[in-house]
Image (cartoon, rainbow, N blue to C red):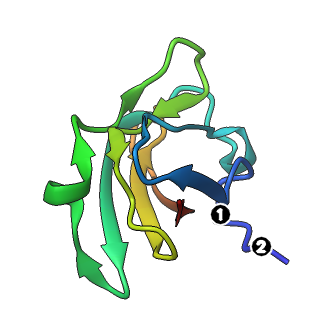
Amino acid sequence: MPSYRMFKESPWEQGEDEQIAYAFDTTPWGVTCPLSPSMVVLINGSDVTASKTTGSAGIGTCATCIVLGRFDNPVPGTTYRIQVTFKDNKATPNTYGAYGEVTGAS
C-alpha cells in the first residue's frame, strides 16, 4: 500500500531515452493553491538532481497541480525518488512534503 505522502499519480516507469515533466495534484494534502514548490531527485539517498533534471518544479495551469522539472534519461532498472516540498496559501503557511518514484525502463 502506498504511503499517503506518495503522489497518487506515482509510481511511473520511464524509458531510458525519454524526458518527461511529471505533474501531481496537491488536493490529497488539502492544498488548493500550492506555493513555492521545490524538488530533489534521489537514488538510495544520494542527490542526483543536477544530472537527471532540467528546470525546476513550478505551479501547473490547474490550481491544484505542481509540475516537476523535466526528468531526463533514467538508467534502466534504477528507481529514483522525487521528493517535493510545497506550501499552502495560509497567512502562516504550512510546508508539506510529498514524493513519487520513477523506475527506468529499457
Residue 104 on image: x %, y %: 50, 63
- Residue lying furthest top: 61
* Label 1–label 2 contact, CB within 8 A: yes
105 and 63: which is toward the camera: 105
Which amino acid is tagged 1? Met
Residue 30's mark?
none
* As drawn, 2 above or below 24: below
Asked whether, in this view, residue 85 is left or right of residue 25, the answer is left
* As drawn, 102 above or below 19: below
Which amino acid is tagged 2? Pro
Residue 56 on image: x %, y %: 25, 38
Residue 26 on image: x %, y %: 62, 40
Q: Residue at x 55, y 51 (%)?
A: 14
How crowded is the residue under tag 2: few (<14 C-alpha within 10 Å), some, or many (20+)? few
Residue 81 on image: x %, y %: 46, 69
Asked whether, in this view, residue 91 is left or right of residue 54, the answer is right
Residue 6's mark?
1
Residue 2's mark?
2
25 and 19: which is toward the camera: 19
Q: How many marks?
A: 2
Asked whether, in this view, residue 49 is left or right of residue 73, the answer is left
Residue at disc 1, secondary structure: loop
